[in-house]
Image (cartoon, rainbow, N blue to C red):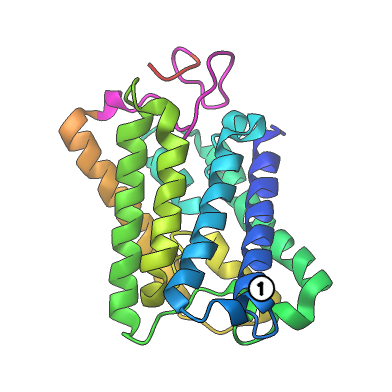
């Protein structure tokens, strides 16, 4: 068994722990920070910055560069569809991502259940906003499309490749700040399933299982039509300078 699926599980587990801790500190009614920052937009921006930095740290970490740091079944499925991830490894990644998300949130729930269960935090569940289900679906579709298109263009351009992780982190921060009131800002089926299983939080789960992969697949289709399938060098968001690659890319590095 390759170590990379275990890295994926650990990474998304850490991401869920970070999301739970940051959201609790910012949004829980008993938090001094919540009292000091009454404006929801500013609080979402604070959460977005923290989660964007978490994503950047994980992407650029040695472990993140080894696995490619998908942390998301929709990302893995898209790269599988592009022919960059073998079927058996894709299955291992997806299983690890779901397991890691549930384990990470479950661990922090054991330690902080009373705070995490508060309705203001609600196990960091992703739920449609007041606009309704269809706008939430459209929001998830759009943000997933944009981030995957950005990843493909950046990670396959020599000058932009080193900044792919920064771009992803900035988009995550922006989405949480601006888009979260529409859909809860998921882009990730594993991230949305974890609160349902751990906290039994009801949500319109089908949105988060369909819109992110559809948006990312659409982005990959557009990229292939513009640049060609051979322009996709590897399934890693951030490739190390050299050495072997779990995805078997031709040169062991992005060209």
Q: Position of residue 48 (x, y in %)?
A: 49, 60
* The residue positioned farthest toward the front in the image shown: 36
Q: Quadrant of the N terminus?
A: top right
Q: Does residue 178 show up?
A: yes
- Range of magenta residues: 229-251
Could you tell me which residue is drawn at 51 percent across and 71 percent down?
43
Q: Position of residue 252 (x, y in %)?
A: 50, 15
Could you tell me which residue is drawn at 50 percent across and 38 percent down?
87
Q: Does residue 77 show up?
A: no
Bin the neighbour count of mark 1 within 10 Å (Cα to Cα): few under 14, some 14-19, many 20 and up.
Answer: many
> Along the horizontal axis of the image, is 88 left or right of 135?
right
Q: Position of residue 220 (x, y in %)?
A: 29, 42
Residue placed most toward the observer, 166 or 130 = 166
Q: Position of residue 126 (x, y in %)?
A: 50, 73
- Asked which secondary structure carries label 1, the reply is helix
> Along the horizontal axis of the image, is 66 left or right of 230?
right
Q: How many marks?
A: 1
Residue placed most toward the observer, 248 or 141 = 141
Q: Residue 209: which quarter of the image?
A: bottom left
Q: Residue 136: which quarter of the image?
A: bottom left
Task: Tell me the residue that label 1 is attached to.
Answer: 24
Q: Is residue 228 above or below residue 21?
A: above
> Along the horizontal axis of the image, is 35 left or right of 176?
right
Q: Is residue 188 above or below residue 242?
A: below
Could you tell me which residue is drawn at 68 percent across and 78 percent down?
32
Could you tell me which residue is drawn at 46 percent across and 70 percent down?
42
Residue placed most toward the observer, 82 or 238 = 238
* Magenta-colored stretch includes residue 235: yes
* Magenta-colored stretch includes residue 194: no
């Amino acid at each position: 068994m390759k170590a990379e699926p275990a890295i994926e599980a650990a990474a998304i587990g850490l991401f869920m722990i970070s999301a739970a801790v940051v959201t609790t500190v910012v949004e829980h009614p008993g938090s001094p920070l919540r009292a000091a920052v009454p404006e929801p937009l500013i609080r979402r921006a604070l959460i977005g910055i923290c989660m964007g930095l978490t994503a950047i740290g994980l992407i650029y970490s040695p472990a993140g560069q080894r696995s490619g740091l998908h942390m998301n079944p929709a990302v893995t499925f898209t790269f599988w569809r592009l022919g960059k991830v073998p079927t058996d490894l894709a299955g291992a990644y997806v299983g690890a991502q779901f397991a890691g998300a549930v384990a990470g949130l479950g661990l922090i729930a054991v330690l902080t259940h009373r705070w995490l269960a508060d309705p203001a935090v609600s196990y960091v569940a992703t739920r449609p906003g007041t606009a309704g289900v269809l706008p939430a679906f459209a929001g998830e579709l759009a943000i997933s499309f944009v981030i995957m298109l950005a990843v493909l263009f950046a990670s396959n351009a020599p000058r932009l490749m080193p900044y792919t992780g920064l771009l992803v982190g900035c988009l995550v921060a922006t989405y949480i700040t601006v888009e979260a009131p529409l859909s809860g800002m998921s882009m990730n089926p594993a991230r949305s399933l974890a609160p349902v299983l751990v906290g039994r939080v009801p949500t319109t789960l089908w949105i988060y299982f369909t819109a992110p992969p559809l948006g990312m697949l659409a982005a990959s289709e557009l990229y292939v039509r513009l640049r060609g399938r051979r322009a996709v060098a590897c399934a890693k968001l951030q490739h190390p300078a050299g050495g072997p690659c779990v995805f078997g890319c031709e040169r062991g590095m992005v060209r």
